[in-house]
Structures are given as structure tokens and as C-alpha cells.
Image (spheres, helix red, strand yellow):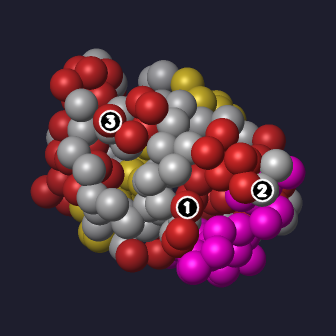
Amino acid sequence: MSPRATSQRIYLVRHGETEWSQSGRHTSRTDLPLTAEGERRIESIAATLAAHPFSLVLSSPLRRAVRTCELAGLRGRAELDADLVEWNYGDYEGLTTAEIREQRPAWNLFHDGAPGGESAEEVGARVARAIGRIVDAEGDVAVFAHGHVLRVLGALWVGHAPEDAERLALDTGSVSILGYEREARVIRLWNGRV
């Protein structure tokens, strides 16, 4: 591994709050706008992100991620990547975990997936392709995407299975930083602010 690679930082930015994320409803393909609070929170971190010399900026094509990227001042440099779209919740789209558990009391997205949607392994395969693009970049990378898909990215980055992403909580409008310590892939900051 080259010295360049071991100094690389990957900034994961979860999109700002939407009406559904605020109420706990599972949102994958439903293309919702950010709330006013969601926009305000992203604007508070925009100066730091916009000033960073990213060599690659990736965004989910869904408008909540694209708008977050735009508010962060990086939309003009962003490449849309369908591998970063949120986990497909299928029949559970728009439902809260409590509503799903009324029918399936022990349901866990990371272990059970979603009927009519994706399994953890399927999401992991998409995310692995995105990681391939990230490690091929010549410097730091910014990734604008969604809660569950970014949690899977964090888990895979440090060598865990997609299912292990359940242990990585991620708030809307948060920034996480992945990188290296020597040659080992590490999490430098999780669910924070820059």
C-alpha cells in the first residue's frame, strides 16, 4: 500500500433530516426533500466541507443526498453513484420499526432484510463497488448518502459483515471519517461534526 493511500480520508455525510427520517419512517426510494431544520444543520458544516480539497465527491442520486451535497458546496464536483442509494425497504417503505414489529416482533433489518426489498448481502455488494471507487481515488473522498447504506459502508471498511452495521448508529446531518492507521482501515470519527 502506498503512503498516499494510507493518508486518505473518506468523509461520509448522511443527508439532512427529512419528514420521514424525523418520524422514524423507513425511507429508501421515496424521494423526499429535506426539512428546513435538515437544511440548516447541513449549512452549519458547509464551510468546512466546501473548503476541503476532495479528489472525488460521490453522491446518491436521490434528492435528499444531492441537496445535502449542494448545501455543502460540493454539488458541482459530485458524481452520482446508484450504488449509494439507500437500502431498498420494499414492502416496509414508509413504515416505522414499531409498525413492522406489530407483525414481525423480532424483525431486524440487518439480519432479516425487507420483503420485496434488499438483504444485507445485496446492499453489501453495492457498497463494496463504491468502496472500490473510493480506494482508487488519488486523495480524500466525500460521500453523500443515507443512514443504512453508510452504516454498511463503515462496517465493510473495517472488515466486518454488512450485518454488523447495526452497531453503527448514524444521525441525519452527521459526518463520519474513515481512513487508515498504517495499512489498517479504521474509523477516525463516527456520527460527529467536522
Magenta stretch?
106-133
Tell me, yes or no, whether the highlighted magenta stretch contains residue 158.
no
Residue 9 visible in rendering: no
Pointer 2 residue: 104
Q: Amino acid at mark 3?
A: Glu
Tally of marks: 3
Q: Amino acid at mark 2?
A: Arg
From the viewer's perspective, is 153 left or right of 75?
right
Dot 1 or dot 3: first in sequence order is: 3
Pointer 1 residue: 92
- Residue 191: x %, y % from top left: 59, 30
From the viewer's perspective, is 91 left or right of 28?
right
Pointer 3 residue: 19
Q: CA distance from mark 1 to mark 3?
A: 17 Å
**Mark 1: few/some/many CA within 10 Å (<14, 14-19, 20+):** many
Image quadrant holding the N terminus, namely bottom right
Task: Tell me what residue is drawn at x 58 percent, y 79 percent.
Answer: 116
